[in-house]
Image: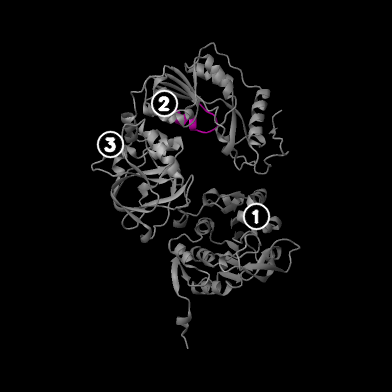
C-alpha cells in the first residue's frame, strides 16, 4: 500500500510563494514558463497591482488554479468565488488550493456563469487534450475534443447571494456574451482576457464599448495586449498598489540631463548574454542583457522617451540556446529602421566610440523588427555617408554570449531626451560631415505634402508651399533624397521652415550658428518646441517653434484621436509669427483657409482612405463607436458645414 506522501503530486515549481504541483494539464512548456515567471504573467501582474485587501472576487475560468491562489496568498483579506467549466481540472485545482493553504479563501465550483435571463440550465463545453485550452465556443476547436454538459450559474442570483466587487475572467471567448447581459452596477474592477481569434476584432471592440458605456475606463499601465483591466471612476482614484509586484507598472523614467556627463555610467560586462525574444517586434520589444550571474543589466535598457521604454525585460535563455560570440563588443541599443528613431535611438550610444580604451569587434543591436536583414544594410550605409566614424555592426539575430560587452549609457532619444548628453552632442559635432558641396538654396521649406500616411498630414500644406515659394523658399521633400543629400541642403540653407518632424534631428545636428529655424507645430504636442530646444542645445543660431493650430479631425473607428490626427493651421497667425522671426517679408498677408478649402481637402483625404472624418476636440477622444464608413463607398467629413 502506497503512503499518502508517495501518492501526492510533487512540487515542480514555485511562483510568487505558491507551490505548483505536477498535474496532467501542465506540460513541460507550462512548467518552463512558470519557472521563468512567464506563466499567465499579464494576468498575475495586473491582479497583484490592482487588487486590494477586502476585495471580493468572482473568478470565471480558474484554469490551473495558479492565478487565483497567487492572489489569495499575496493579498490579505480576499475572498474568491471561483468557477471552472472543465470537470477534469476540478480535482487538481482543489488539491492545489489545499496544498497551498488557500482553500479557506477560495470557493471552487464546476459551473459556467451566465448572465442572460433566458440562459439554459446546462451548456455544452468542449474539452480538448490540452485541458487549459478548452472552451464553450465551437470556433477554432482543437481536433479530438470531447463535449461535456455543465450546469450553469445565473449571475444575477450569484450577485444577490454572494456580493462581490471584482470580476476576473479568462473564459476563452465567453466574456462577450456574458458582458452583453450582465448587470455590472456593483463592480468596480474587471480584469479579463479578450479573445479576438474567437469573436473577431469587432467582438473585442464590443467588449470594450460595453465597459466604457457602463462607466468603466481602461487602466492602461496594467493592460497588456489582450489582457485588459477596467475600473470604475471611484476605483481608478486608488491607482496601483504600492509594492514589489506593482513595480512593473509604476512610472519608470530615464533621467538624461543635457548638462550632466554620462561617461561614468558605462559598464563593462564579462560573459554578457544578449537575448531578444524571437517573435517580439514593434514599438516595444522583449529584450535584455544579462551579466555572468544571470542578472539583468539595467544600463542596457533602451528608451524611446523619458517615460517610454523601448525594451521590456525577458527571462534568461536556456544555456543550450546561447551562441558564443568571441571578442569585445559595444552595446548599441535598439536598431530601428525609421529615420527619426534611427537618428536618435540607434546612434544614441555611439558617443562611446570616442572613449574606447580597447579594440572592439563592432557594435551589437537588438532589432525592432524581424525583417532587419532587408533594412539594416541600407540604414548603416546611409549613416556612413554622414558620419566619419567607421564601425562594424551586427544585429542580434539569436541569443549571444560575448566575452566582454561595453554598455554605455543612452545619450539621446525622443521627446525630452533629444536634448542629449554632452558626450553625444560633442560626438555629433565632431563627426558629422562638413565638407559637402553647397546647394545654393538659401531658404528651404521641409515639406510633408508627399507623405500619404494618415498620421503625417496637416491641412493646407500645398497652399503654404505656394506662399513660401513667393518668399524665395525651395520646397524640399527629404524622403526623396539620400541622407548625405539631405545634409548637404541643411548645411547650405540659412533659413529653414517646416512642420515638426524627424528631418529636424538632422537639421539640428548641423550645429550651425548662422542657421535660423522656424518649426511649425502640426499637432497639439510638444514636438515642435522640443525640436527647437534641441536645435539650441546643439548650437543652432536661432531655433524657434510656432503654434498656430485651430481645429482637428480624426478618422472614424480610431481608438484615440491622436493616433490619426489631421490639424488646421491658422495661416494668419503663422504669417505673423514668421514675419516676427524674420523668415518672410513684412508685406506678406496670408489668409486663413476657408471652410470650403478645408472641406475639399478633408474630402479628398476621406475619399483616398475610404474612411469618414470627424472633428474632434481632444487628443484622447475616441471614435471607436463610429463605423469606418456610415455610407458604403461614400466617405464623409462630419461636423463641418
- Provide the residue designation for mark 2: 485
Q: Nearer the viewer, residue 67 or 630?
A: 630
Q: Position of residue 57 (x, y in %)?
A: 59, 62
Residue placed at 31% from the left, 34% from the top? 389
- Label 3 vs 2, first from the N-terminus: 3
Report whether 112 appears left or right of 412: right
Query: Considering only vertical position in the picture, is 584 above or below 276?
Result: above
Q: Nearer the viewer, residue 245 or 396?
A: 396
State the residue lying farthest toward the bottom: 1
- Provide the residue designation for mark 3: 354
Residue 411: quarter of image: top left
Q: Nearer the viewer, residue 240 or 388?
A: 388
Q: Tell me the element at label 2.
A: helix
Distance, label 1 to label 2, CA atoms, is: 50 Å
Q: Tell me the element at label 3.
A: helix
- Provide the residue designation for mark 1: 199
Task: Look at discs 3 and 2 and give the one toward the viewer.
Answer: 2
User: What is the magenta range?
Assistant: 520-535
Amino acid at each position: 500500500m502506497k503512503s499518502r506522501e508517495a501518492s501526492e503530486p510533487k512540487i515542480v515549481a514555485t511562483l510568487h510563494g505558491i507551490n505548483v504541483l505536477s498535474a496532467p494539464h501542465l506540460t513541460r512548456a507550462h512548467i518552463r514558463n512558470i519557472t521563468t515567471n512567464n506563466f499567465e504573467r499579464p494576468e498575475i501582474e495586473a491582479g497583484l497591482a490592482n487588487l486590494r485587501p477586502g476585495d471580493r472576487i468572482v473568478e470565471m475560468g480558474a484554469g490551473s488554479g495558479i492565478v487565483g491562489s497567487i492572489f489569495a496568498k499575496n493579498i490579505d483579506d480576499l475572498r474568491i468565488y471561483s468557477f471552472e467549466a472543465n470537470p477534469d481540472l476540478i480535482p487538481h485545482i482543489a488539491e492545489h488550493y489545499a496544498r497551498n493553504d488557500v482553500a479557506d479563501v477560495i470557493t471552487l465550483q464546476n459551473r459556467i456563469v451566465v448572465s442572460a435571463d433566458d440562459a439554459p440550465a446546462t451548456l455544452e463545453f468542449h474539452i480538448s487534450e490540452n485541458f487549459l485550452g478548452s472552451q464553450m465556443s465551437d470556433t477554432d476547436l482543437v481536433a479530438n475534443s470531447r463535449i461535456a454538459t455543465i450546469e450553469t450559474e445565473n449571475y444575477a442570483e450569484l450577485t444577490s447571494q454572494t456580493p462581490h466587487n471584482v470580476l476576473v475572467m479568462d473564459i476563452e471567448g465567453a466574456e462577450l456574451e456574458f458582458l452583453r447581459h450582465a448587470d455590472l452596477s456593483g463592480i468596480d474592477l474587471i480584469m479579463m482576457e479578450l479573445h479576438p481569434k474567437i469573436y473577431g476584432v469587432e467582438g473585442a471592440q464590443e467588449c470594450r464599448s460595453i465597459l466604457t458605456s457602463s462607466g468603466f475606463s481602461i487602466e492602461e499601465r496594467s493592460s497588456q495586449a489582450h489582457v485588459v483591466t477596467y475600473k470604475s471612476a471611484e476605483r481608478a482614484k486608488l491607482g496601483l498598489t504600492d509594492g514589489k509586484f506593482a513595480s512593473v507598472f509604476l512610472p519608470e523614467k530615464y533621467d538624461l540631463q543635457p548638462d550632466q556627463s554620462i561617461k561614468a555610467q558605462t559598464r563593462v560586462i564579462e560573459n554578457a548574454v544578449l537575448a531578444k525574444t524571437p517573435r517580439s517586434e514593434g514599438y516595444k520589444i522583449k529584450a535584455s542583457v544579462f551579466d555572468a550571474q544571470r542578472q539583468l543589466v539595467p544600463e542596457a535598457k533602451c528608451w524611446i522617451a523619458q517615460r517610454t521604454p523601448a525594451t521590456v525585460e525577458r527571462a534568461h535563455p536556456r544555456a543550450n540556446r546561447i551562441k558564443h560570440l568571441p571578442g569585445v563588443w559595444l552595446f548599441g541599443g535598439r536598431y530601428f529602421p525609421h529615420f527619426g528613431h534611427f537618428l536618435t535611438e540607434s546612434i544614441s550610444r555611439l558617443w562611446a566610440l570616442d572613449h574606447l580604451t580597447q579594440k572592439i569587434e563592432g557594435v551589437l543591436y537588438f532589432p525592432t523588427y524581424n525583417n532587419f536583414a532587408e533594412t539594416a544594410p541600407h540604414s548603416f550605409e546611409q549613416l556612413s555617408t554622414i558620419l566619419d566614424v567607421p564601425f562594424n555592426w551586427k544585429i542580434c539575430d539569436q541569443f549571444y554570449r560575448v566575452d566582454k560587452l561595453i554598455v554605455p549609457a543612452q545619450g539621446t532619444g525622443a521627446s525630452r531626451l533629444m536634448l542629449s548628453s554632452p558626450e553625444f552632442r560633442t560626438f555629433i559635432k565632431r563627426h558629422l560631415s562638413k565638407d559637402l558641396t553647397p546647394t545654393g538654396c538659401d531658404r528651404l521649406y521641409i515639406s510633408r505634402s508627399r507623405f500619404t500616411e494618415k498620421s503625417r498630414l496637416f491641412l493646407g500644406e500645398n497652399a503654404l508651399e505656394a506662399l513660401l515659394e513667393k518668399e524665395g523658399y525651395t520646397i524640399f521633400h527629404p524622403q526623396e533624397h539620400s541622407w548625405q543629400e539631405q545634409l548637404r541642403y541643411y548645411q547650405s540653407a540659412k533659413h529653414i521652415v517646416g512642420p515638426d518632424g524627424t528631418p529636424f534631428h538632422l537639421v539640428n545636428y548641423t550645429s550651425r550658428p548662422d542657421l535660423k529655424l522656424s518649426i511649425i507645430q502640426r499637432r497639439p504636442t510638444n514636438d515642435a518646441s522640443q525640436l527647437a530646444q534641441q536645435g539650441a542645445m546643439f548650437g543652432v543660431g536661432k531655433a524657434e517653434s510656432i503654434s498656430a493650430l485651430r481645429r482637428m479631425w480624426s478618422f472614424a473607428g480610431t481608438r484615440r484621436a491622436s493616433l490619426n490626427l489631421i490639424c488646421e493651421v491658422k495661416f494668419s497667425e503663422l504669417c505673423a509669427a514668421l514675419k516676427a522671426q524674420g523668415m518672410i517679408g513684412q508685406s506678406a498677408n496670408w489668409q486663413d483657409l476657408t471652410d470650403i478649402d478645408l472641406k475639399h481637402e478633408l474630402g479628398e483625404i476621406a475619399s483616398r482612405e475610404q474612411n469618414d472624418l470627424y472633428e474632434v476636440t481632444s487628443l484622447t477622444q475616441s471614435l471607436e463607436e463610429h463605423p469606418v464608413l456610415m455610407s458604403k463607398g461614400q466617405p464623409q467629413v462630419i461636423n463641418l458645414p
